[in-house]
Image (cartoon, helix red, strand yellow):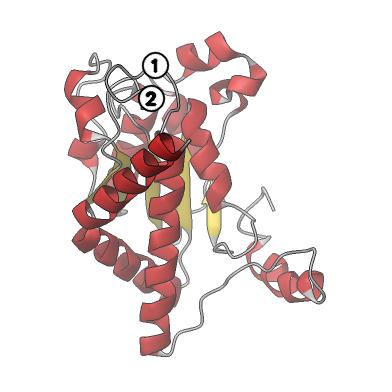
Amino acid sequence: MAEFGNLVREHLTQVEKHNADALNNVAELFLGSIRAGGLVLTGGAGHSLAAVAETFYRAGGLACVYPLYHPDIQPLHGGRASTSAERLTGLADEVFSKVELSGNDVLVVFSTSGVNPYPVELAIAAQNADMPVVAVTSSPANAVAPRRADTTLAENASIVLDTLVLPGDSSYPPEAPVTAALSTVANAFLWAEILARLVDKAAEAGVEIPLWRSSNVPGGDEANQRYLDLYGPRVPQL
C-alpha cells in the first residue's frame, strides 16, 4: 500500500533528522570503545529483543557485540511470562553481572516505553560500572506509559536515540492506529545509521572496524574466523 509505505518513509526521515547529532555522538562513542578494545553490550526485553538480534552476529554487523539475554524475557519462551519478567526487579542485575567488563565498554538498551524495571535497571547497572549508556526509546510512548520503576531508561542514559513511535506502537491507519508497529523498523534503522556513521568516522581516523561477513558468500567463513577467535573468549554467545 502506497499510503503505508509513505507513512514509514516519512517516519524514518523524521527519526533521522531528529537524531542526527545524537547518532554522530553514538558513532564517536563506539569508535572510542573499539579503539580501546571494548565491547558493545546490547539489551532489551520482549519485542525489543528483535533489535538485540539485529545487533548480534549478522552479516555487516559489529563483531564486538555482547548481547544481554535471559530466556524469561523472550516472548517465544512464553508471551505472558516475558511481560511479567521484564517487570521484575533484580533480573537485569543478574544478567549484567555475567559480563566480564573491560572498562571500555558501551551499553545500548532498546525499550520503546522505557519504563519497566528490566531495561531501566540494565542502564543503572551500567552507570554504576562507569559505562556509557545509549537508550533507544520513544519519548511519546514514555510520556504516557505507566511507571513501573523509580526512573525511566532515558533518565539513566548518556545519549538518547528517539524512535518517535506513538504510544501503543501501532501506526496504521493513521487516523486511528491499530496495527503495523514501527518500533522494530525504527530500531533497526537507527542501529544501521550508527554503523554507517561509524564506518565513515573510522575510515577518516584510519581505524579498522570489526565487521562480520555473510557466511553465505565465498570467503565469509574464513573472514569471520578471525573475529570468532578474537571475541569468542569474551562473548559466550559466539
Disc 2 residue type (three-letter): Tyr
**Label 1 CA crowd tier, 10 Å (few <14, some 14–19, many 20+):** few
Image location (x, y in percent) of residue 50: 54, 37
Q: Which amino acid, mark 1?
A: Val
Q: Residue at x 51, y 82 (%)?
A: 208
Task: Name the spot of residue 123 as percent of width and height, x first.
Answer: 32, 39
Q: Given contact means CB atoms under 8 Å apart, are the residues at marks 2 and 1 in contact?
A: yes
Residue 224 found in image quarter? bottom right
Q: Please tell me whether residue 111 is drawn above or below residue 134 in the rendered image.
A: above
**Residue 130 point in image, percent of width and height:** 28, 53
Q: Is residue 55 left or right of residue 86?
A: right
Q: How many marks?
A: 2
Q: Secondary structure at mark 1?
A: loop
| Local SS, label 2 | loop
The image position of residue 35, as x and y in percent, is: 42, 77
Above or below, 76 against 34 in this view is above
Is residue 98 visible in this depiction of the protein? Answer: no
Left or right, 63 with respect to 213, comes to left
Q: Residue at x 30, y 70 (%)?
A: 28
Residue at point 39% right, 79% down?
Answer: 200
Which residue bears the numbered disc 2? 172
Q: Which residue is mark 1?
A: 178
Q: Which residue is drawn at the image coordinates 43% and 90% (left, top)?
A: 206
Residue 85 tag number: none
Is 30 displayed left or right of 209 in the figure?
Answer: left
Toward the viewer: 229 or 202? 202
